[in-house]
Amino acid sequence: LFSSTQFGAVQRDPSGVEAGVFVSESDITTVTRWGLRLTVGAQVVLHEHAVLGVAVQSPVLAVFSTVESTGLLSSRGVVDVGDPDGVFVLDEASAVEADSGLGGPARVRVGLALPFDSAVVSLDADYQNGIRRRQRGVDRRPVYNLRAGARLHASDTVDVGVGFFTDRSPERIERFGDVRANFYGGTLGLHLRKVRRLAEEEEDEHLIFETTIALRYALGHGRIAALALLPDLTATSLFTEPLVRYRVHELALHLGSGLRF
């Protein structure tokens, strides 16, 4: 995680004395956590045109974690024009800690596939329970996501795919830098195949060259904990952390190729 913040302000009181402050802060933190999780899954053929799959993941059992951080703070305050005061602080820290307890939520996924001669339709649901361990930086609310898609066989060489999905965030917002966004979007793609027959003496009869081209769009909206500098430099705290709403448009192009024989 990398963050960098800079603020500057100047205020003049009724007597004409100027007071100002400039603060620059940068921080790099790397957190690595190790844990154990059990996953169990099953797939059942309900019908010729219906296949059900279920996967259950246990909560993550935390084992240990490592934290490395480097922070740089530079500030310069001017109480009077001729009285500058500057501070420069470089701080580095690292730690390896044994951990215990829950480090991640349980997860349940259920999927249903409906294969037909000219198309395949799939539905998928995903649920994660909430978990709160503030001392370890884990604070997640319960969340669910849904996905639906279809693949249509337009011809022997062309398939058309379309899908819709949600990507809702389980994160809570409590302090500066926390972000929570829920995404809702869709995909549209083409799958192209080209068959090349081989000579009779070859072990395989043919090679199949495959190319996938897909476009993905998602609309995200949520909140971010921002940091604002108060205009009153005599206040106990110069900063406040307002929640700011934001919206983002995400567009991605996916290209893939493969060879089957």
Image (cartoon, helix red, strand yellow):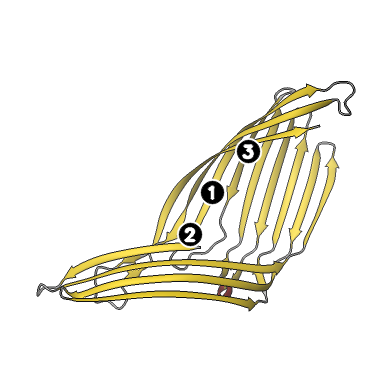
Q: Position of residue 191 (x, y in %)?
A: 67, 30
CA gap, disc 2 and disc 3 = 26 Å
10 Å crowding of disc 2: few (<14), some (14-19), many (20+)? some
Q: Amino acid at mark 2?
A: Val
Q: Amino acid at mark 1?
A: Phe
Q: Identify the image quadrant of residue 27.
A: bottom left
In the rendering, which numbered label is found on residue 163?
A: 3
Select label 2 or label 1 by which is in front. 2
The image shows residue 223, relative to residue 186, as above or below, that is below
The answer to which of 111 and 27 lies nearer the viewer is 27
Residue on which disc 1 sits:
183
Q: Identify the image quadrant of residue 237.
A: bottom left
Q: Is residue 80 left or right of residue 125?
A: left
10 Å crowding of disc 1: few (<14), some (14-19), many (20+)? many
Q: Amino acid at mark 3?
A: Gly
Residue at 48% in and 74% down: 92
Q: Position of residue 260 (x, y in %)?
A: 78, 33
The answer to which of 192 and 54 lies nearer the viewer is 192
CA gap, disc 2 and disc 1 = 13 Å
Label 3 sits on a secondary structure element that is strand
In the rendering, which numbered label is found on residue 179?
A: 2
Q: Is residue 11 left or right of residue 134?
A: left
Label 1 sits on a secondary structure element that is strand
Q: Position of residue 132 (x, y in %)?
A: 59, 71
